[in-house]
Each structure stands twice: as structure tokens, then as C-alpha cells.
Image (cartoon, rainbow, N blue to C red):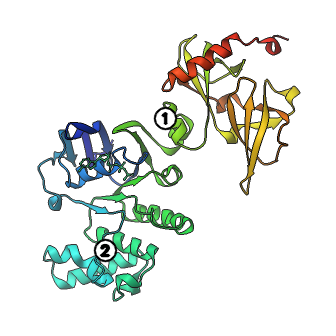
């Protein structure tokens, strides 16, 4: 592994004894796109602030290229931030905004002009230098905020929900642009969002957070396919999460039946939670499936139908199907063993306990015939 550009080691942050960050360990390598993903208030912005130097940590260390920087002031860190509200100066032109940090640093004027022109070129607004900020669209203001940060040539760019003010279409376009910009600049981006689709689309690595903790880190595919617990499975994408039990190696029981599964490394008889993504389910004739559900309702989503259904144990199911199904009818659902993800029994134990008991008293007559 190359020398990390940023590390947080056992970082804890408390406000008035109230823990906001709890023992955070993060490693960011040079040149990669990282995302902090989690619900509002989980501590994402606070992590950015500790790296930028706007907030002291209560315990632990912040390192930049292997050097401890806890005591280094924000303006001496080779890190820049793009804020959610852009924080542009409305009374200055675009070029003056972008030049601001360099002017403060007393950089010679010809160099400022050169670097501002380059930064505007990078965000595809080369001809906009003389414009007023108020004469720009939301997407253009966003790009100017990015230009103002990258003109400082930071090794790390921190982006705090930079796309949240944009409409859906522009937001998608900016996702491509940001990803492309990160690759062209070759610097590390640490991007904050509570939008899981955005995180999956843009990142090399995602840190999933909740209540001041990093619950899981990994590539978008790993996090989507192998969520570590109920919270992650629920927060990332749509999931069917059901209570079950390991009954043998590669065999799990749920929904009143037994199914083959991949090796989950979980001992036999352990209660587990099963995750199946709606797009991995196929509707079929009830005669051809172990699991039967009754269709409750459905929504047309353009390229698929999102179908809500209930099984005989009362478990809710979400199914994505290219074909519609009739409300109130019974249909079979099938899936491939490799699409079934088994997790250790985690949160919401009390709620699942009751449903597990229901499962254990169900007969298995269909399987035995
Ligand atoms: N200066 C402060 N004093 C006291 N509490 C604070 C302070 N700054 C942040 N907090 C609290 O810390 C928690 C985490 O805030 P933070 O802004 O890091 O969350 P976030 O994940 O970025 O949320 P959002 O997505 O809403 O921006 C929140 O409960 C917030 O109220």
C-alpha cells in the first residue's frame, strides 16, 4: 500500500461530553475518490472539519502524509474544502473568487492569472472570469466553488454535499464531471453525501457511517453485495431483510423453508439475517417455487415494476420485475443461491425474535414432499 495521504487514528470528538465521533479509523490513499456516506447528523461533516483543521479532535491523531497534524492550523494544511452552500463572495467576479486564496497568499499576479485560467478551464468555464457570481446558474456556481478550491493545488479536496442544491439531472451530470475531474487531477477526493446512489456511482471506496461510527468500508460493489449488518443493508439500495437460521454449512432456513447459500462462515444453529436485493428475485408460477407471496401493490418505475408483496409468515417483500403482476394474486419467487447474502444476526433483535419463533413452529411439509 502506498503511503497514505490522510489517516485518522482512534479519533474521538466530543461536544460537552456528548460523543459525535467515536474511535474513527480512516486511511485515505493518494489519488482515490472516497465517500463518507450516512444519515443526517452521523458526523460526516465533523470528520471533514477535523481533516481541514476547523475542529480539534478530543482524542486520537490526524496524520497527513505520515506526519501528525493535530496542531497544524487549517491554512497550513495542504487540504481545501468545497462547502455545501459554495460560500462564494457575491460582490466579486468569478475570477476574483477563484483567485481569492492565492491573493491572500500574496502569490505574484501573473501566476495568479495563469492558475485561475487553468482552474476555470478545468471546470469548463474558461470564458466566465468577468461574470458576476449572481449571473451564474446553480451548477456553474458549484463549478466555481470547485475551481476556487483546486486553484490552491491541494493534495486532498474535501467536498461537503457539493451537489445537494442541484436538480436531479444536473446532479447526475456533475457526478460524471466530478469523477472525471478527480481522475484528471489525480488527487484524493473525500466526498460527503447522504445519497447512497451517488456514493455507489462515484467512489473507489465508501465509508458507511451511523451515529459517529464507521460501520463498514469497502468498494461500492463490496458494500452493496456484502453488507456487514442490518443498518448497512437497509441504507444502501433496496433490500429484503429477513430473519433466518443457519441449519448446515451452505444451508439456511427462512420464510418457512430451507435454501442453499454461499459460505457465510456462521456456525450452525446461529440466528442470521438474510439479504436479497429486489432485482435478484424472479416471479414464477407458485408450483415452481418454495416461496409464495401475495401481491399487495406495484409501481411502474419506467424500466421495471416495483412490486410489494407479503409471504405467509407476514414478511414484506420488494420485487423488481420487468412484467407486472396482478394485485391480490399468489406468485412464486425464486433467486439464485449466490444472490442470497447471509449476515450475523444484528440489530432489531427483539423484533426478529418474535418472527423467528413463528418460523420455528411452521411445518416444512412442502419441502419434505
Ligand atoms: N459545534 C457543535 N457543537 C455541538 N454539537 C455539534 C457541533 N457541530 C456538530 N454538532 C453535532 O454533531 C453531530 C454530527 O454533525 P455533523 O454535521 O458532523 O453531521 P453530518 O453527518 O455531516 O450531518 P448532515 O448530513 O446533516 O450535514 C450532530 O448531532 C450535530 O448536532
Image x and y of residue 319, in percent: 72, 40
Give me the residue at 23% from left, 55% from top.
Answer: 52
* Picture quadrant of residue 77: bottom left
Q: Is residue 209 above or below residue 54?
A: above
Image x and y of residue 16, in percent: 19, 40
Mark 1 burial class by Cα count in 10 Å: few <14, some 14-19, many 20+: some
Instruction: Tell me the CA gap for discs 2 and 1.
Output: 36 Å
* Picture quadrant of residue 283: top right
SS for callout 1? helix
Residue receiving disc 1:
231
Image x and y of residue 98, in percent: 29, 77
Give me the residue at 40% from left, 71% from top.
Answer: 142
- Which mark, by number, is residue 294? none
Along the horizontal axis of the image, is 344 left or right of 84?
right
Give me the residue at 51% from left, 41% from top.
Answer: 235
Q: Is residue 201 above or below residue 273?
A: below
Given contact means CB atoms under 8 Å apart, are the residues at marks 2 and 1 in contact?
no
Q: Is residue 249 visible?
A: no
Query: Is 62 or 243 nearer to us in this picture?
Result: 243
Along the horizontal axis of the image, is 189 left or right of 294?
left
Question: Does the residue tagged 1 have its C-beta within 8 Å of any atom of ligand 1?
Answer: no
Is tag 2's residue or tag 1's residue first in the polypeptide sequence? 2
Along the horizontal axis of the image, is 215 left or right of 339?
left
Q: Is residue 195 above or below residue 362?
A: below
Q: Is residue 193 visible?
A: yes
Mark 2 burial class by Cα count in 10 Å: few <14, some 14-19, many 20+: some
Residue receiving disc 2:
88
SS for callout 2? loop
Give me the residue at 30% from left, 80% from top.
Answer: 90
Amino acid at each position: 500500500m502506498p503511503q497514505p495521504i490522510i489517516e485518522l487514528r482512534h479519533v474521538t470528538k466530543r461536544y460537552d461530553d456528548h460523543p459525535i465521533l467515536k474511535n474513527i479509523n480512516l486511511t485515505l490513499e493518494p489519488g482515490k475518490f472516497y465517500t463518507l456516506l450516512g444519515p443526517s447528523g452521523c458526523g460526516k461533516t465533523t470528520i471533514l472539519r477535523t481533516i481541514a483543521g476547523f475542529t480539534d479532535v478530543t482524542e486520537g491523531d490526524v496524520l497527513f502524509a505520515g506526519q501528525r497534524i493535530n496542531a497544524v492550523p487549517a491554512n497550513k494544511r495542504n487540504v481545501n474544502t468545497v462547502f455545501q452552500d459554495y460560500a462564494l463572495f457575491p460582490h466579486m467576479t468569478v475570477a476574483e473568487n477563484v483567485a481569492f486564496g492565492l491573493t491572500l497568499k500574496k502569490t505574484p499576479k501573473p501566476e495568479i492569472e495563469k492558475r485561475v485560467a487553468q482552474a476555470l478551464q478545468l471546470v469548463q468555464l474558461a470564458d466566465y472570469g468577468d461574470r458576476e457570481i449572481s449571473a451564474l446558474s446553480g451548477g456553474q456556481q458549484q463549478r466555481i466553488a470547485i475551481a476556487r478550491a483546486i486553484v490552491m493545488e491541494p493534495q486532498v479536496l474535501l467536498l461537503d454535499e457539493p451537489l445537494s442544491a442541484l436538480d436531479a439531472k444536473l446532479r447526475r451530470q456533475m457526478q460524471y464531471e466530478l469523477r472525471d475531474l478527480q481522475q484528471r487531477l489525480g488527487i484524493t477526493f473525500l466526498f460527503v453525501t447522504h445519497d447512497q446512489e451517488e456514493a455507489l456511482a462515484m467512489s473507489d471506496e465508501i465509508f458507511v457511517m451511523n451515529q459517529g461510527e464507521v460501520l463498514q468500508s469497502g468498494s461500492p460493489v463490496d458494500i452493496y453485495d456484502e453488507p456487514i449488518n442490518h443498518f448497512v443493508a437497509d441504507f444502501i439500495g433496496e433490500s429484503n431483510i429477513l430473519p433466518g437460521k443457519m441449519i448446515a454449512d451452505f444451508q439456511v432456513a427462512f420464510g418457512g423453508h430451507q435454501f442453499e447459500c454461499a459460505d457465510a462462515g456462521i456456525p450452525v444453529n446461529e440466528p442470521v439475517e438474510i439479504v436479497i436485493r429486489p432485482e435478484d428475485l424472479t416471479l414464477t408460477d407458485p408450483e415452481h417455487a418454495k416461496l409464495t407471496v401475495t401481491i399487495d401493490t406495484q409501481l411502474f418505475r419506467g424500466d421495471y415494476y416495483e412490486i410489494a408483496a407479503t409471504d405467509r409468515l407476514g414478511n414484506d417483500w420488494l420485487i423488481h420485475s420487468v412484467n407486472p403482476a396482478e394485485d391480490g394474486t399468489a406468485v412464486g419467487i425464486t433467486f439464485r443461491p449466490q444472490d442470497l447474502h447471509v449476515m450475523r444476526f444484528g440489530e432489531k433483535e427483539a423484533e426478529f425474535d418474535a418472527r423467528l419463533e413463528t418460523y420455528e413452529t411452521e411445518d416444512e411439509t412442502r419441502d419434505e414432499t
